[in-house]
Image: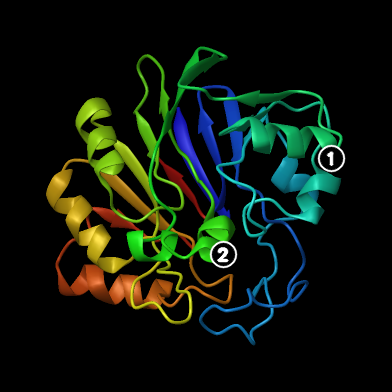
Amino acid sequence: MTQYTHIRNATGKLTIKNTTFLIDPFLAPKDSYPGFEGTFNYQQRMPIVDLSLSMDNLLSNVTAVVVTHTHLDHWDETAINAIPKSLPIFVQNSADQKLISSQGFNDVRIIFESVDFNGITLTKTGGSHGTIEMYANPNLAALAGDAMGVIFETLNEPTVYLVGDTIWTSDVEKALHHFDPNVIIMNTGYAQVLGFEDSIIMGTKDIGRMVVRKPKAKIIAVHMDTVNHTATSREDVRKFIKGNNIESHVAVPEDGETIAL
């Protein structure tokens, strides 16, 4: 059985058969951090809401952790301190491996292209954590860095595409074409940097585009209502999907909600 429990922001638990992946753990208490400097609504402290689950409940039955990138809202000090150091951690590159290993974790594995774990194949997919214009700014390019997506495949279970922190790119199109996922988890909070019209992650228009591209897939929209710079809320997404009559295609889970896949 495959299911997804949404915890908060981009943090979730993806269970495939008897393996549970904790994804992008951002576990700090409400208001722990100042807003991201130079971004939309930067005066708002974050996380904006508390965790929906107790730490014990959240970490129970976790088999491994997937960190798509090490920005604060995907990998924070609370997660570093709370997660058992022996758990396997899957990361995108050697820089993230080096960082997380230095934080005391002793089984940090790079997904170079793909890797097998408990009979599940994890394949790294690409993207862009911002627009070409943003990456032309050296300071912003350094801050944005890289962020991977991940395909999860195993026999007799849905293929899950964790899109990650990216805008819509040819890498996203390639992943959709090559893997034809049954479930697509999208970060759709439309996070914005001051001075730029566009976003560093997806938004409502990308949900509409995804429904057109993969009308048979189950789409799960997350990464909203938790960090300061997301300009799109769950309410905005629900209004959009209702207005476009695509409610049967798109789930917008509340924190703590579990969706059977």
Q: How far apart are the two marked residues, 1 and 2, measured between alpha carbons? A: 25 Å
Q: Are marks 1 and 2 in contact (CB under 8 Å)?
A: no
Compared across the picture, whether 157 is left or right of 72 comes to left
Is there any visible trace of residue 256 in the rendered image? no
Give the x, y percent position of residue 164: 45, 47
For the residue pair 248 and 196, the one nearer the viewer reads as 196
Residue bearing the label numbered 2: 139
Residue located 27% across and 76% down the image? 239
Q: Secondary structure at mark 1?
A: loop
Residue 101 placement, left or right of 193: right
Does residue 25 appear in this view?
yes
Categorize mark 2 by other alpha carbons within 10 Å: few (<14), some (14-19), many (20+). few
Tell me what residue is drawn at x 68 percent, y 50 percent. Answer: 75
Amino acid type indicated by mark 1: Gln
Residue 211 horizontal/vertical position (percent): 18, 52
| Left or right placement of residue 70 versus residue 28 in this view | left
Q: Which mark is residue 103?
A: 1
Residue 40 on image: x %, y %? 51, 81
Which residue is more in the foreground, 167 or 206? 167
- In the image, 88 versus 119, the foreground residue is 88
Q: Quadrant of the C terminus?
A: top left
Pick the quarter of the image with the N terminus.
top left
Neighbour tally class for label 1: few under 14, some 14-19, many 20 plus, Cα within 10 Å: few
Q: Which amino acid, mark 2?
A: Asn
